Amino acid sequence: MPPSSRRRRHLAALVGSIVVVLSACSSPSEVSSSGDADASASGSAPSSGAAAEALQTAYTGQLGEPPTTPTEPPPDVDLWVVSCGEQSPGCAAPTAATREAAETVGWSVTVCDGQLLPDGWGDCVRQATSAGADVIIPIGIDCPLIRQPFEEARDAGVTVVGGGGADCDAAGGPKLWASELLQLDGLSIQEVYELHGRLAADWLIGRTDGQARVLQLRFTDTLWGPWMADGFEAELGTCEGCEILSTLEVSAADLANGSMAQKFSTALLEVPDANAVLVPLGGFMPFGLAQAVVASGRSDDLAVITGLGSSANLDLIRSGGGQDAIVGYPTEWGAWGSVDTAIRVLNGEEPLVQGNGVQVVDAENNMPAPGEEFTGGVNYRAAYTEAWGV
């Protein structure tokens, strides 16, 4: 496959997928009280109380617990899981976890590979509807991206439960799903992504001792990109000594045509006083952004944090390869939560909050062992099987 085709296919996964594969992490570590606060990327603790508090807020994050209210999985359910693209680990891992959870309760599961493209996602939804599926769980797909197929599924009586994406009403359209995945108590999906942004800001405030001078990338092609940016900007605004020096808007087209890395490199050159960088999606880093940080010669002086990402981002953090932190999300817990939501909807019960939230991971705090999943210390499998009686 030509390089341009590979970029386009990977791009679609980045746009559609809002789930992330991370490894398990330990509880937040103690924050050290020594070192040079200006060494933003390599890591010393802040000297000021407010900055130290912000850093600990980032490491603690916000995580809940899986629901404990018992519910009995109905039998003979035909579930279709629409993967945003099995070529991408960010789609394949939660798809596999959804299958595992559904098969645990004895459901029949069909996985349809959306092949990283909205047309593919729509085709999968239509196939599921035509096949008489009882439930569809779209992994990492926002309803507005393929509204018509979801309307057809609703009209055919298919129950659709979110697998990390937003229903169409989040963009001013009709509500087409039985339920989104409810992640944290009292927070809408928009507020969850604003929380991602706030925690990223807290980490930068802490790692720069309240002196963050930020190059911010803002992803404009998704619902969650602006939501994350809004949360980041609001939280950074609480830091008197912090400032966004420049905001670089990036889009799907920038990744597809290979221009994102050059745009980022240019933006970095234009803000020589920057000591902090926010990248909204960890999947951007291997496409030249991490290399640009290293090539700038400023890697040791820049605190670089991303939002949603994968184990590749954790490897960059471990190796000092141009990234220093990520806002971690327990993907597979969320997949089991989507199945729990589907069970309760089919039973005529109210969907419950699943508790899968976020914590910031860096080299010294919450960093998982290679090959393990991020769980926030929660044995979610045991919790769900107990609640389901299986």
Image (cartoon, rainbow, N blue to C red):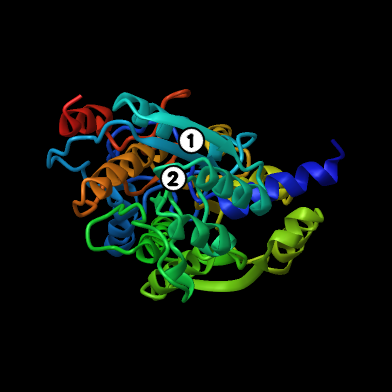
Q: Earlier in the sequence, mark 1 or mark 2?
A: 1
Name the element at disc 2: strand
At horizontal 44% and vertical 72% (from top left) the residue drawn is 174
Place of residue 367 in the rendered image (x, y in percent of width and height, measured from the top left): 41, 34
Quarter holding the N terminus is top right
Q: Which residue is mark 1?
A: 95
The mark found on residue 137 in the picture is 2
Crowdedness of circle 2 by 10 Å Cα count: few (<14), some, many (20+)? many
184 sits left or right of 138 in the view: left
At horizontal 32% and vertical 64% (from top left) the residue drawn is 188
Extreme residue in the right direction: 2
Disc 1 residue type (three-letter): Thr
Report if residue 94 is visible in the image: yes
Determine the image quadrant of residue 380.
top left
Extreme residue in the left direction: 69
Residue situated in front as seen by the camera: 141 or 120: 120
Q: Nearer the viewer, mark 1 or mark 2?
A: 2
Quarter holding the C terminus is top left
